[in-house]
Structures are given as C-alpha cells and as structure tokens.
Amino acid sequence: MPRLFTGIEVPPETGLSLSAFRGGLPGARWVEPADYHVTLRFIGDVDGGLAEEITEALAEIRPRPPLTVVLDDLAVFGGEKPHALFARVVPDPDLAELQAEHERILRQLGVAPDTRRFTPHVTLARLKRGAGPDGVAQYLAMQPVFSRVSFTARRVALYSARDSVGGGPYVVEAAYPLLQDEA
C-alpha cells in the first residue's frame, strides 16, 4: 500500500543552498537535500487501484505557466512543541490555485479532504523531543539572515514514501509538466 503525496520538486541547486542550514540543532532529523519538495497535497496510504486512478486523474490538471517559487525565511511548526523546521514559501495565488486543483481532483476520487490549511514550505528537518522551543529559538537566532531563494517549477510530481514510516527517501511515481498555454 503506497503512501502518496503531490508536490513540487526543489531543484538540486536550490537544495544545495538550503542544505547550508543543516546541523547545529539537537533533536533534528535532517531531510536529505535530494528529498526537498513543496507538498501540494498529502494523500496517505492508498491501495494500488486508487493509486492508479490518482496517477491518471492528475494527468488532467489544466495547463498553466511554470510557477516561480520563492523561499524567504526559516520557521518552525509546532510552537511550544516544535516538530518541523522549514523554509517558508512566499504565498502565491497561482500556487494556491494549483494546490486547490489537486484537492478537488482527489476529493472527486473519494480521498478524504485535507483538514489542514495549506502552508507551502520546504521541510528541512523533523524535530524530536530534544529540540525544545528554547533550543529551536537559539538555533534560529544563530543563523545568518535568510537570503531569498527562488526557482521555477516546471512540473509537479506524485511521490511515494516508505510504507508507514514517513520521510524520505521519496520516489517520483509520475510527473506532470506545467505547460505554457499557447493561446
């Protein structure tokens, strides 16, 4: 039973830039730069039949120009119980529209709605209990000023992750180009 999600691949040169933030945070399990991505829609564990339907349905997303993705800061999910360190993606209406289309397609296939608000980001590390709020605050304070990083997303991907473990390595099961309208 594959664990699936859709997302935007982070190019290797952007991943290399983000990897400079690895290390120096006790309790962090660092994501490999090759696994950096911007999740559009977590799907979860599905059977092979539904996985095939999802693969086919995503091929029908409407053509759209490539997206510029801008990363502008480091942040943490979890507040007093931090659980992930990430690079924040600047909100963009085109990105939100793409994510909403993925949500609609998956709901039409019977996948339960995602109840979390879409917060585009690139996860850099998952945090264990050892990474308390004070340690995370100290880590963030010690980092240099985050220089904006941008890249052009030319396709989205359907990823699979290891069964019941979460985290990488991730495998691109299918890729869907963002096609420039010729009109």
Image (spheres, rainbow, N blue to C red):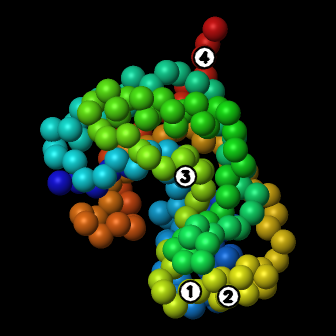
Name which of mark 3 and mark 2 comes first in the sequence. Answer: 3
- Residue at 52% x, 37% y is 99
Q: Nearer the viewer, mark 3 or mark 2?
A: 2
Q: Residue at x 31, y 52 (%)?
A: 44
* Marking on residue 134: 2
Nearer to us of marks 1 and 3 is: 1
Q: Are circles 4 and 2 on residues that touch, CB within 8 Å?
A: no
Q: Indicate left or right for 128 with 112 as reference.
A: right
The residue closer to the viewer here, 142 or 110, is 110
Q: Earlier in the sequence, mark 1 or mark 3?
A: 3
The residue under label 2 is which amino acid type? Asp
> Is residue 85 visible in the rendered structure shown here?
no
- The answer to which image quadrant residue 112 occupies is top left
Residue at point 55% right, 65% down?
123
Q: Nearer the viewer, residue 20 or 43?
A: 43
The quadrant of the rendering that contains the C terminus is: top right
* Numbered mark located on residue 181 in the image: 4
Q: x%, y% of residue 82?
A: 56, 76
> How far separated are the C-alphas under marks 4 and 2?
49 Å
Q: Amino acid at mark 1?
A: Ala
At horizontal 67% and vertical 58% (from top left) the residue drawn is 88
Local SS, label 3:
strand
Q: Which residue is mark 1?
A: 131
